[in-house]
Image (cartoon, rainbow, N blue to C red):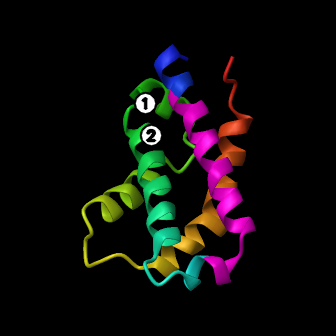
Amino acid sequence: MSDRDNRALNEILRLCAIGADLVARGPDWYTGDPDNVPGLAAESLIVKIGENVARMSSETIGLHPEVPWSSIKRMRDRLAHHYEGTDYGAVWDTLVNDLPVIDGYIRSLDLG
C-alpha cells in the first residue's frame, strides 16, 4: 500500500474517532443547537472521509472490495453538492451506524 493511501486511511480513522465523540454527546446535543453547528460538523466529517477515499489509489480500493468505497464517495458527493438539500437526520444516522462499520473495515486492513 502506498504511503499516500496509508495516510488517507489513517486520516479516515481519525475522523471516525471524532465522529464517535460526537455521537457520544447524544442526539439531544446534535439536534439542540439552533444554528445546527453539530450537524454542520458531522456533515464536514463525512465529506472529509469521502475526500480521503477519493484520493486513494484504485489499486488499494480494488484489493479491498469489502469496504463500501463507492457508498462513501456517493455520500460525500451528495453532501458536498447539497443535492436536494441536506437531511441532517441521515447525517446523524451515518455517524451512529455507518462510521463505526467503516472504522472496523479500515482497522482490519494492513496499514503497515
Whole-angstrom CA distance, mark 1 to mark 2, is 5 Å
Q: Is residue 53 visible?
A: yes
Please report contact status of discs 1 and 2: CB closer than 8 Å, yes or no: yes
Type of amino acid under label 2: Val
Q: Quadrant of residue 76?
A: bottom left
Give the residue number, with chain letter if any, for mark 2: 53
Type of amino acid under label 1: Met
The residue carrying pointer 2 sits among few (fewer than 14), some (14 to 19) or many (20 or more) residues within 10 Å by Cα, namely many
Verify whether residue 28 appears in magenta.
yes
Q: Is residue 2 visible?
A: no
* Residue 56 image label: 1
Span shown in magenta: 8-29
Q: Which quadrant is home to the C terminus?
A: top right
Observer-nearest residue: 106 or 10?
10
* Residue 39 image label: none
Q: Quadrant of residue 81?
A: bottom left
Q: Which quadrant is home to the N terminus?
A: top right
Residue 9, relative to residue 82: is it above or below? above
Image x and y of residue 55, in percent: 38, 32
Image x and y of residue 78, in percent: 32, 64
Residue drawn where x is 48% and y is 56% of the image: 46
Verify whether residue 109 appears in magenta.
no
Residue 37, relative to residue 104: is it above or below? below
Which element type, helix, strand or loop, lies under badge 2?
helix
Image x and y of residue 37, in percent: 47, 70
The residue carrying pointer 1 sits among few (fewer than 14), some (14 to 19) or many (20 or more) residues within 10 Å by Cα, namely some
Residue drawn where x is 68% and y is 48% of the image: 17
Residue drawn where x is 48% and y is 32% of the image: 62
Residue drawn where x is 58% and y is 84% of the image: 32
Q: Main secondary structure of the magenta part?
A: helix
Position of 93 compared to 41: left or right? right
Q: Quadrant of residue 109?
A: top right
